[in-house]
Image (cartoon, rainbow, N blue to C red):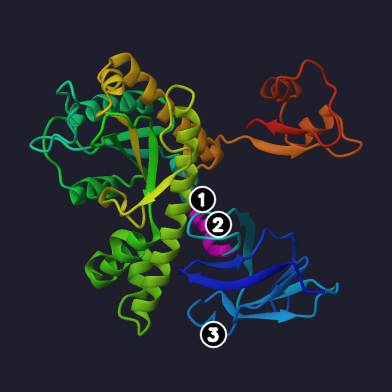
Amino acid sequence: MSAAIDVKNVRVWPSPDSTRVVLDLSKPVEYSYFTLNNPERLVIDLHDTKISAVLTDLAKDTNLLNTVRTSTPKKKGDARLVLDLNKKVEAMIFALKPTAPYSDRLVIDLVDSVAKVAHTKKQFKTDRDIVIAIDAGHGGEDPGSIGGRGNYEKRVTLGIAKKLEDLITKEPGMRAVMTRTGDYYLSVHKRTEKARDSDADLLISIHADAFTSPEPNGASVWVLNLRRANSEIGKWLEQKEKHSQLLGGAAEVIKNTTSERYLARTLLDMSMDHSMDQAHGVANSVLSELKSITKLHKRSPQAASLGVLKSPDIPSILVETGFISNLKEEKLLTNGWHQSRLANSIFKAVRGYFKHNPPDGTLFARTKDLKHKVKSGESLSLVAQSYNVSISSIKKANKLKSNMIRVGQVLSIPQS
């Protein structure tokens, strides 16, 4: 009987202090793992799985990984993958659901233990804000689409963008950066450049859709497609002087090495993969909020080759807030009350996404609640004691009316 799941491909992305290994799977997989010492190894057992991927020469450009190989599994029908390591690492393993153009994946992040400690200490001293770049589409001599009542898209987008800026600015731990603050033209290149110069964690481009007939209506959210992503990476590879903008200190490490181009490509691929995953996550969150206040033209994120979404290093989404070519929606889109509702929906979605997925070193990351699954024999007082927090704070965080908890219950543990 053949295995139900296939490891179709294995990708390795090295950087100076970490290496990411990605298994491309035919289906979601059940897995377990453990480490061995002398020599250092990470062993991953994959249930009901076969490995058809080629594993040779995967580790040649990483200083953490020596070889990737298979070994005899504990159970027939399973697969065992062994990562032979050059030094002690901290391993983080997690599954990712399909996100166009990727199938199910299992991601193994190997982090240099010594480098991680130094990096963590540095990051957590900052408690930095999450930076959101807000891009009001069009402007100046570029009016964008024009509605049947003569309203310009550029004015609608700036109105919504300013309202979104106000909401983000008032939120502790978040900061907004506007690509344009008035009615003037800004090239697509300048928009993404402003986001990068601000070290943005996310770029949101606000637009209003249009069609040749007045019937279409509803909001949609767009992300970058893979073809445009690969094209942009190719352009960045040709501009060596710009590598440091995308790769930071890693650019200096790989500079003038014999494998510079290959390493830059793998690092840019890794950056783009991460950005596209985050963009899809934010896009889904935005759609979930928008559907409660307006009709959706498309119920899932749409992929397109749009210039403002091209940054390999910045997760980027484009929000079409409605059709300005539809007379009813044109009236809504130019209404301040409706613009506020749109801005609030986008804000709630973005804040909610980053509350669950805070970037390292941010205030959101430091104040993120821990999760605890109640085990047999545990009481609320025992859980509180384990995390050095009060019983009342756990009850408040979980809206508990009594001290009773049940096995399997997942509790939010507030920061002490």
Element under label 2?
helix
Task: Give the magenta part as a residue range.
Answer: 111-120
At label 3, the amino acid type is: Asp
* Residue that protrudes farthest toward the left in the picture: 141
Q: Is residue 61 above or below residue 110?
A: below
The mark that comes first in sequence, 3 or 1, is 3
Question: Label 3's element?
Answer: loop
Q: How far across and how far down the image is residue 378, in percent?
A: 87, 34
Tell me, yes or no, whether the two marked residues, 1 and 2, touch with CB atoms within 8 Å.
Answer: yes
| Quarter residue 43 falls in | bottom right
Q: Is residue 324 visible?
A: yes
Kindly report which numbered mark, 3 or 2, lies closer to the viewer in this rendering.
3
Q: Is residue 339 left or right of residue 406?
A: left
Mark 2 surroundings: few (<14), some (14-19) or many (≥20) residues within 10 A:
few
> Dot 1 corresponds to which residue?
121
**Residue type, label 2:** Val
Quarter of the picture containing the N terminus is bottom right
Residue at 53% from the left image edge and 42% from the top image edge = 357
SS for tag 1? helix
For mark 3, what is the residue?
57
Amino acid marked by disc 1: Lys
Query: Pointer 2: what residue?
Result: 117
- List x then y, in percent, for residue 291: 47, 28
